[in-house]
Amino acid sequence: MKSEEKKDFRTNDNLVVGRNAVIELIKSNREIENILVAKGEREGSISKIIALAKEKGIVIKNVDRKKLDFISAGANHQGVAANVPAHEYSSVDDILEFAKSKREAPFVIICDEIEDSHNLGAIIRTAEACGVHGIIIPKRRNVGLNFIVAKTSCGALEYVKVARVSNINSTIDRLKKENIWVYAADMDGQLWSETDFSGGVALVVGSEGKGVGTHIKSNCDVTVSLPMKGKVNSLNASVAAGIIMYEIARQRL
């Protein structure tokens, strides 16, 4: 084996590149956001990496080699890289226990397919200011706790619990059993300013393009909307979430 192939590279705290490095990362049981594999790469230890990842339910993404070259900043990635979170994840139980420890009704934000890192970071920042007990995100089709999210949150990520779940609808069902009302922030709902947010609250925020998913929206107790007077029919996800979060916080005061 050539000397450069023996090297394991960590280009920053959130990206691990190189076949051996990624294999050891998977074996370590550390939380992994996803594994990026260059399109067409299936030879040698790449097959082992894919098998290990599938066994542990880790998301695998096939990407162009040029993208790997770019994000690896010149390191010899050998066709594979792994994204690891910038912060440790909590659990839904941790969030509920935190609310209980403060003797407060739970205040939770659920993100449904927020794919923009800046949006998630901004939501976390506002959530911390509003006294949110925790944020729940799905494992798939949602940005994780990468370094951009951490940077955009301006330190709030250190104080806000974020749980990552396999199924949002199942999590909503679980929250309902805890006497938490679930509100979808979406079009064609009742005015946010005329909504009673007393008691346990879980606010579901969807992506700008698609909003809250149909199945998830149908599982929510109430849909709340912001008035739109302009020609643009949607707000940035973090802006919409921020307005409603502050109304919830106002009522809780």
Image (cartoon, helix red, strand yellow):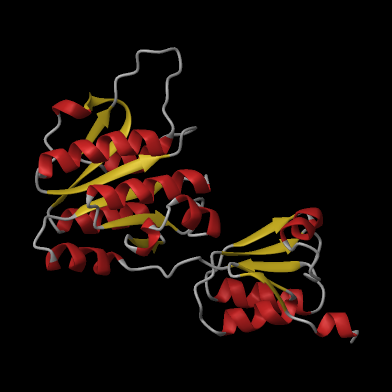
Q: Identify the residue shown where x is 34% and y is 18%.
A: 228
In this image, 247 relative to 114: left or right? left
In this image, 75 relative to 253: left or right? right
Res 145 seen here: yes
Res 140 seen here: no
Q: Nearer the viewer, residue 165 or 226?
A: 226
Q: Position of residue 177 (x, y in %)?
A: 16, 58
Q: Position of residue 35 (x, y in %)?
A: 63, 66
In this image, 189 relative to 163: left or right? left
Q: Work out which residue is located at the far right of the displayed protein and give it.
A: 2
Q: Position of residue 141 (x, y in %)?
A: 51, 50
Q: Identify the residue shown where x is 31% and y is 43%.
A: 204
Q: Position of residue 213 (x, y in %)?
A: 40, 39
Q: Identify the residue shown where x is 51% and y is 81%.
A: 29
Quarter of image, res 195? top left
Q: Nearer the viewer, residue 118 or 35?
A: 118
In this image, 109 relative to 54: left or right? left
Quarter of image, res 188? top left
Q: Is residue 202 above or below residue 225?
A: below
Q: Quadrant of the C terminus?
A: top left
Quarter of image, res 34? bottom right
Q: Quadrant of the N terminus?
A: bottom right
Q: Identify the residue shown where x is 59% and y is 71%.
A: 54
